[in-house]
Image (tube, rainbow, N blue to C red):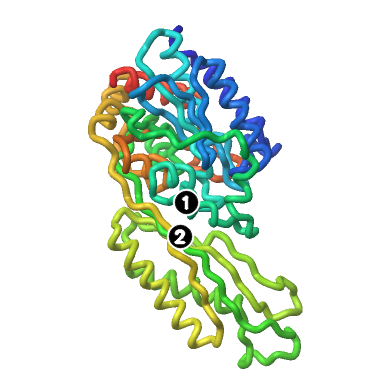
Amino acid sequence: MALNPARFLEDLHQLRSFGASGVDKGVVRPAFTVVDIAARRWLASRMQEAGLTVHLDPIGNLFGLNGEKSLLIGSHSDSQPEGGWLDGALGVVAGLEIARASKEDGGPPISVANFQDEEGRFGILTGSDVWTGNATLAEADRFTDTDGLTLGAARARMSGRAKEFLPHEMFSGFIEMHIEQGPGMDVSGNQIGVVSDIVGIREIRIKICGRQNHAGTTPMALRQDAFQALSDFNQRINVAFGALATPATVWTLGHAEISPNASSVVPGTARFSLQWRDGDPGRLSRMGKAVQEIAEAISQERGVTVELGDIGGIEPAAMDARLKGALQDAAQDLAPGKWLDLPSGALHDAANVSRVMPSAMLFVPSIGGISHAFDEDTHEDDLVLGLQVLNQAALSL
């Protein structure tokens, strides 16, 4: 039986029902939540129905296996706290459809991967990070989310269902299909993007401890205001990073908590995360040094304590020439004049997997460049074209 685009789209929309936000096509399906686990169970059932052997490893990565030395296709199905319906899910369902069609048609062996916690509730690309050996399971179990829950405690919900980690040698390579998550292709009118490389990332959690006090009676000159220290920190980071950056460098202070978060109290504590991305490991390191220098200066000048957590990260990754070439050939055949090579400014599991096997990525456009939001979307014609390009490339390998 040939590739079935209608079945692919039906599965993609069914997966969206797990954690549907009720706003646009958005989903709320963070890693290890009840709806995330329910979605993975449903995907496991679809893999089993397709004749694939279902395997859940200790960190929660879900595989649908089809023999030895198969090509692995996949992504992730967990979402941001306010996520889109295609981010990651597209790659998993595309892999499922291609593996299913190939098996039905007696084609080459293709397996499916659904990595856990790609969105970073606990770490950075946590599931593929552990599977590829960048972090041990024991180290990952100590990771915490922003509420202080450890990954080990969250992982306990899978007790009794997980098996061993799969050897990387089972697979000949890995291809991940994804939405672009940026405006480039949507603006240019291209329908297919073949990824040349993936940027590196660094992330750190920071805690500033000042002195909680009365907002009406504490003179401004005597305040040890944790929020003002955070604000100062952010402004200095913008200046320091701006001096080091290229036009492609980005950084984000994306999560912040102020305590006690009351209008009549000088904030005593501020917790926040800082993330920066670039394709040059040296630049990433220099930006990390700037963070440390600014923390020391803020501490001395404002009379607060600045506690820096460990800097986590993933190194920049180039995509495999052979797999990339197969995608380029398929794109030229099926979308002549409507495809391009481009780097990925977003981080993906393929960056980790590229360390242990040949890896490549395929992009389809994001309408308006919107992602990590409820109104994330892609035209269904582009979704199907991406599926067809990926399928042709996979069969050629």
With respect to residue 213, does 373 lie above or below? above
Indicate the position of residue 166 as horizontal and vertical percent values: 42, 34
Indicate the position of residue 109 as horizontal and vertical percent values: 37, 18
Q: Is residue 26 visible?
A: no
Task: List the residue tagged with mark 2.
Answer: 203
The residue located at (52%, 46%) in the rendering is 119
Distance (Cα) linking label 1 and label 2: 8 Å
Indicate the position of residue 324 as horizontal and vertical percent values: 28, 32
The mark total stands at 2
- Classify residue 116 as left or right of residue 249: right
Question: What amino acid type should be assigned to the residue bearing mark 1?
Answer: Ile
The residue located at (28%, 30%) in the rendering is 323
Task: Residue 74: name its quadrant.
Answer: top left
Task: List the residue tagged with mark 1.
Answer: 124
The residue located at (37%, 30%) in the rendering is 192
The residue located at (24%, 30%) in the rendering is 322
Query: Which of the image's four quarters has the C terminus?
Result: top left
With respect to residue 339, does 278 lie above or below? below
**Residue sitting nearer the eye, 124 or 283:** 124
**Pointer 1 local density, CA inside 10 Å: few below 14, some 14–19, many at least 20:** many
Query: Which of the image's four quarters has the N terminus?
Result: top left
Secondary structure under tag 2 reads: strand
